[in-house]
Amino acid sequence: MSAITPLPCQRHLFEIPRDVSYLDAAAWSPLPRAVREAGEAGLLVKSRPWTHRREAIPIQAERARTAAARLVGAGMDDVAIVGSVSHAMATAAANLPVAPGGRVLRVADEFPSLRYAFDRLAAARGLSVEEVPRPGDGDWTAALLAAIGRPGAPPLAIATLTPSHWTDGGLIDLDRLAPAVHAVGAALVIDATQSAGAVPVDVGRWLPDFLAFPTYKWTLGPYGLAFLYAAPHRQDSTPIEENLGNRPPAAGARRYDRGELNDPVLLPMAATGLELLLSFDASAMTARLRHLTDRLEEGIAGLALAAAPRALRAPGVLGLRAPDGLPAGLLDRLREAGIHASERSGALRLSPHVWADEDDIDRCIAALRREP
């Protein structure tokens, strides 16, 4: 089988100066021009409401919902529009019936949005929380599989997982883990924040009870909006906030829609960003991200910075760790060189997206090689 040709660089769609290497998609993305323009048009709707029909705004909600559903392989009736991933996870935790004595399973150092609601659920329902420690060999999937099937452990009630670790892109292979979770009769909740828009996400393959992702990172949209997929058997439940729009006759995942849904600014921005992503070949886009992070890894060979093996890391994120910790002030020095990245739990997290090119990568490599 021939290798997939990577998607060409899409920098022309953005407003990124040539001397800026923005390698921080895992934090938040710059807006494409079209998304910014959609937001500006939406501001005029609110600025001059007498010139716009409010009846047109719900159409934007369904446009965004449809695009979000397509991105994760869902039906549009299975997707709710919420305010954040933490909102989504609170909804999921409130609608998972569990018996006392079971386990909630997650990885160590998980992002708070995927922890807090389930900590509260565990305390209220008499569940234990098991955090799988960071494996020395970097193989999160093997460590999680061992935890799921550990003899003598309390029964698994809920697995709260992500397709990769948010701090450094460590791969968490849901193609292997989801069947193991289902085999023991546990619920599966997925936070796809660091995956939706970067790698293919398919609810039909993983069969989660709930899956959520926001719009401000890899999906090229605004802050303050997220989507929640709810499996059909999880839709006849109770939203965490009651509003006119999510009460009957609203049905399906729309029962979980947030209040003040019909935002003339955020909805068209989110829809525009999602539709732009959907216009790309997903496999070609993922191949581009892998090409860029592989180039980064190859370029820093010989430095005192280590990444997980390629087979154990997500395509779009390269997490670099140093034996004695990252040098003090590293992010500031990179920023002075026009390179934008993040430090997360001791790792330099480099996360290019479709706007980044080889010059961005090479500038970052050169800056890291200048480090003392």
Image: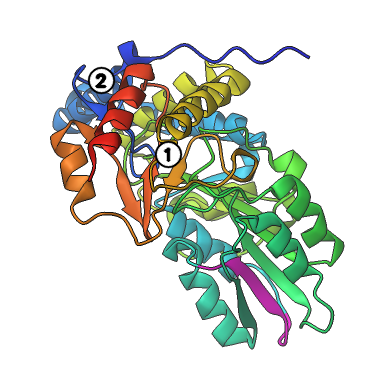
> Label 2: which residue?
37
- In the rendered view, does 67 fall on the left or right side of 232? left
User: Nearest the camera: 27 or 59?
Assistant: 27
Do the CB atoms of the residues marked 2 and 1 lie less than 8 Å apart? Answer: no
* Residue at image point 49% right, 65% down: 240
Where does the N terminus fall, quadrant-wise? Answer: top right
- Measuring from the top left, give residue 219's x and y in whole percent: 44, 33
Considering only order in the chain, which callout, 1 or 2, is on the residue closer to the N terminus?
2
Give yes or no for residue 104 being in the magenta stretch.
yes
> Label 1: which residue?
302
- Measuring from the top left, give residue 198's x and y in whole percent: 52, 33
**Mark 2 vs mark 1, CA separation in Å:** 44 Å
Q: Which residue type carries mark 1?
A: Gly
Report the magenta residues as a range: 99-108
Which label belongs to residue 292?
none
Badge 2: residue crowd in 10 Å (few <14, some 14–19, many ≥20): some
- In the rendered view, does 217 fall on the left or right side of 248? left
- Measuring from the top left, give residue 214's x and y in whole percent: 44, 44
User: Nearest the camera: 61 or 205?
Assistant: 205
